[in-house]
Image (cartoon, rainbow, N blue to C red):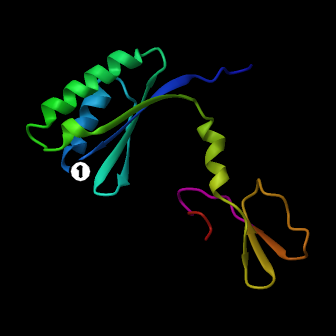
């Protein structure tokens, strides 16, 4: 069975840190499955995703209204940088593996996840499955 990947609208907003919780709540209430929070200098960048069927123009208008209303309580919200871009859904179940590359330990060992190829240089391979209970193996 071939699974068709969905498309999403990614909304990125840089706001004063004090406003992050209030705006995150509004984004989730509007339909975002969650909100990603990243440091952006002295501001926080909130990234939320909406089904592509969402009307981008209407979404931007709504968020602009929320930012203007929040400005009364959190100065600087009305000037928040706001961007909307379509993105393709990723296969998160497989994509996270890209962050775990093999690494060499000492002169003779190499630690690698099971999906990385065995070492051809003669180093001994230690295979560790990265997982929540064990960690990354580093």
Q: Mark 1 — residue?
A: 17
Main structural element of the magenta stretch: helix, strand or loop?
loop
Q: Quadrant of the N terminus?
A: top right
| Foreground pick, 118 / 12 | 12
What's the residue at 28%, 57% (across, down)? 42
Q: Position of residue 83 (x, y in %)?
A: 40, 33
Vertical arrangement, residue 31 with respect to residue 106, above or below? above
Q: Position of residue 74 (x, y in %)?
A: 13, 43
What's the residue at 21%, 32% (across, down)? 67
What's the residue at 28%, 20% (across, down)? 61
Say whether residue 5 is left or right of residue 126: left
What's the residue at 62%, 40% (across, down)? 93
Query: Is residue 16 a member of the stretch shown in magenta?
Result: no
Q: What secondary structure is found at the residue carrying circle 1? A: helix
Q: Position of residue 43 (x, y in %)?
A: 28, 52
Say whether residue 85 is left or right of residue 39: right
Q: Quadrant of the C terminus?
A: bottom right
Task: Give, as a single range, the part of the protein colored magenta.
Answer: 127-134
Say whether residue 118 is left or right of residue 49: right
**Residue 134, quarter of picture:** bottom right
Vertical arrangement, residue 8 with respect to residue 102, above or below? above
Q: Position of residue 60 (x, y in %)?
A: 33, 23
**Residue 78, quarter of picture:** top left
């Amino acid at each position: 069975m071939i699974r068709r990947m969905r498309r999403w609208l990614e909304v990125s907003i840089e706001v004063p840190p004090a406003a992050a919780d209030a705006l995150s709540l509004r984004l989730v209430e509007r339909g975002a499955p969650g909100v990603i929070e990243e440091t952006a200098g002295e501001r926080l960048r909130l990234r939320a995703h909406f089904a592509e069927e969402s009307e981008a123009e209407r979404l931007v208008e709504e968020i602009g209204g929320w930012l203007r209303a929040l400005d009364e309580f959190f100065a600087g919200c009305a000037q928040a940088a706001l961007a909307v871009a379509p993105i393709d859904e990723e296969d998160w179940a497989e994509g996270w593996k890209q962050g775990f590359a093999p690494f060499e330990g000492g002169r003779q060992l190499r630690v690698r996840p099971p999906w990385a190829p065995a070492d051809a240089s003669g180093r001994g391979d230690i295979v560790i499955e990265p997982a929540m209970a064990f960690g990354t193996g580093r």
